[in-house]
Amino acid sequence: MKLRDLRLIFWIAALLGLLELGLEWRAYQKGWPTQIFGKLEEWAPAGEPEFGPTSDFPFRSRIAPMPKAPGTTRLWVASSSYAEDVQLAPDAIFPGLIETELNAQGIAVDMLNASRGGMDTRANLVDIEELAPDWKPDIAILYQASNDIDVLVLQLLAGESAADEGVVAREDQARSFINPLTFITQWTEGTSAYAHLKSQITTRLTQSRVLEHGLGAEGELRMDELVQSFIDSCAARKIRPLLCTFGTSHDRSNLRDLPADWGDNLFRYNIHLSIEGWIDSVQVYNRVIEKVAARNGVPLADVAAALRGHPEYFRDFTHLSAEGHRVAADAILPVLTGMLKAGTPKPQVQSESD
Amino acid sequence: MSFNSPQFLAFLPVVLVLYALMFKRDHLRTILLLCASYSFYMAWNWKYAGLIAFSTVIDYFLGLRMAREENHASRRLLLIISLVMNLGLLALFKYYNFFVDTLQDSLTFFGAQVHLPHHELLLPVGISFYTFQTLSYTIDIYRRQLGPERNFFKFALFVAFFPQLVAGPIVRAADFLPQLQGKPDASESRLLAGMQRVFRGLFKKVVIADLLAGLAVDAVFENPAAFSSWDLLFALYGYTFQIYNDFSGYSDIAIGVAAMLGFHIPENFNRPYLSRSVREFWTRWHISLSSWLRDYLYISLGGNRSGKARVKFNLMLTMLLGGLWHGAALNFVAWGAYHGALLFFGRQKERAGSAASALRVFVERFVCFHLVVVGWLLFRVSGMENLTQYLNGLGQWTGGSELSKLFYCVLALGLATHFLPAKWGDGFGKRIERSPIPLQAAFYAGVILFLCGISMQAPAFIYFQF
């Protein structure tokens, strides 16, 4: 065997490489983060960056020094891609809009937008545990749902054991000295071709599976535990929590108008729950949020109500348009202002007997 | 590392390039393939590579010693050591908890309350396959049918050769070791044919087996009570084609990768659902295991040469152990017993003679296929309750289907690829082979992307668990 005998393989590699290069360039031009070209920082001003994240300031918001200025209130946003929104400038997404508005009203605030794509509430809690002691936030805003539902789908519909196996496999991989293999998986999953294949093929196939239509009573219970753990974690660190209901572009009443590609998107990370099941699970989540807020005496911003019936506030099923961010900020601001002016009492850590 | 993973997509070309660079040097070539094989295995769990290494070392030295030994009793002792070591590891990792549970249940049934200890060890991937492979080596040397391999690295490569390491085909030393003595027959045409075989296997696994599982089979078997009799019946047909395409797909990939490296691995499947009898089925399904069981177990027990009762016993024991080989659970034992019974009654029937008209061939194939399908129900269920639910559901004759059209399309594809003449697929393959290289590359690149798109949430190969 000679190297020349492998020319078919080299040709295949070259064609796949060229395709990926083209797709990466296209994604880069659209402002998406890419593995080869990085990210087109259109919104970033030249010179010193005004917004994070940077190595010293791990938040997607206006850079502030770690020591808190006297008289300033620190706001923390615990969310995911909906509040990170890499497609818009940091001051055009709802955490940035809130900061700008409050400062304009003469209320000195620093926004620490700790939201990153793919985070669920548990990941938010890890962030609070690791970063909050240094950055000392006063108020933490929780805006979550879909990633929590995705995790619950894995735990409840794919079977707890399947989720556990996933964790064990990842841990085993991490411990394995053949780490290049883990790198290959991560790199492959980061390619533009992978993203296209997932949205064009995988999501469509998923809709032909036998799907479940809800997470059941156990799902509701787990959601309750998650939100409660957020409140408890905040209370333990003397942070005042603010809960938000979660908005979606469509609900049962206008489901027929849901664009096909928005529906497909729901199956990128979930292969077990139907669209109806997904929508109902968000409703259940919002009911849980309201119930937990009332139980703990925690302020609640009804973002879902403000966004309901306006698909134009969204650019897909869960991610907001620029207008949607404005509406979400407007829904949160009065509650936040009320907290800042009145000084809502901090919730107590729930005892085990609760 | 699974054949349908991105890691393997990167791993194989790297191995091939290094292999081509080192091809002329016999020793380097062997070392490279050995390192690649251990890397491939360690991608799952590096700790368990020690088990393969242990079996390799033991059987290498036992083989050398056995070949030198003239005394029959000593040779027998060496064989027993090999059997105890290899089967002992298999029993410890795969069957210990099952036997303990069974014993505990039996004792409880008789009123004794005892708590026997379990282990929490993971089942090493492919242990059943490489154990049988190394056993064939020592048994063949014991029988003086094979000389020992003196080069340790070549022997280690025989045990750990990555294309068939974790899910077969079970390759015998007599077939593989001679191929390591000279330069492997690796040429561009062999490589292209091997690659085509790999893609055929991936198609079977990703497009047919995984889609059947994902679209219906898994959900229906998970909760049979929620589905109509129609759905239960078609999910069972779905599983019949899922398991065939999953396992034969793996064998195709293994045979194809080995061919790309210049090695020949025996066929493992020959369109088994075309069989006219269960006996014929076992000459077409998992051929390397059934022939292993025939040569090393059934014949060792006396085979057909003993009395009627003894033949019956040999057959049943072989099939029971064959069932148990697949997994430490009662449903696999029941599946083995079911096939043992079918083989026994089939033997009696075949003796009555058979002149084959087309109608008779069709009826025999139809009956045999459905007997095998019933066996797959035993094989797939998760326990007695699951089986009862499934049978109850089937017996209710309720109609209506929740299964998607795509599922029925994939099932039809599974039927077509199995039952239609093989030359149709071969003709398409030959047309691709005759195309210019850039065109072939574009075709394969498209296939890779398509398969990646389908396989993103795909499960591992079924036979990995065995």
Image (cartoon, coloured by chain):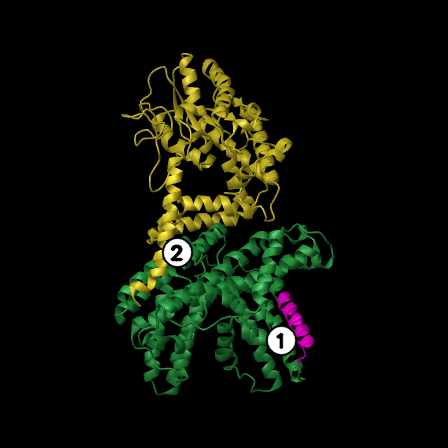
Query: Between marks 1 and 2, how big is the CA–CA gap?
Result: 40 Å
Q: Quadrant of residue B441?
A: bottom left
The quadrant of the rendering that contains the C terminus of chain A is: top right
Residue type pointed to by label 1 = Ser
Residue type pointed to by label 2 = Leu
Find out whether residue B134 is within the magenta segment: no
Q: Which of A234 and A223 is in front in this view?
A: A223
Mark in the foreground, 1 or 2 = 2
Name the mark on residue B277: 1
Q: Nearer the viewer, residue A44 or A344?
A: A44
Q: Can residue B221 be seen in this view?
A: no
Q: What secondary structure prevails in the magenta region?
A: helix
What kind of element bears circle 1?
loop
Residue stretch in magenta: B356-374
Q: Quadrant of residue B350?
A: bottom right
* Mark 2, residue position: B9
Q: Which of A236 and A262 is in front in this view?
A: A262
Look at the picture and state if A263 lies above or below B119.
above
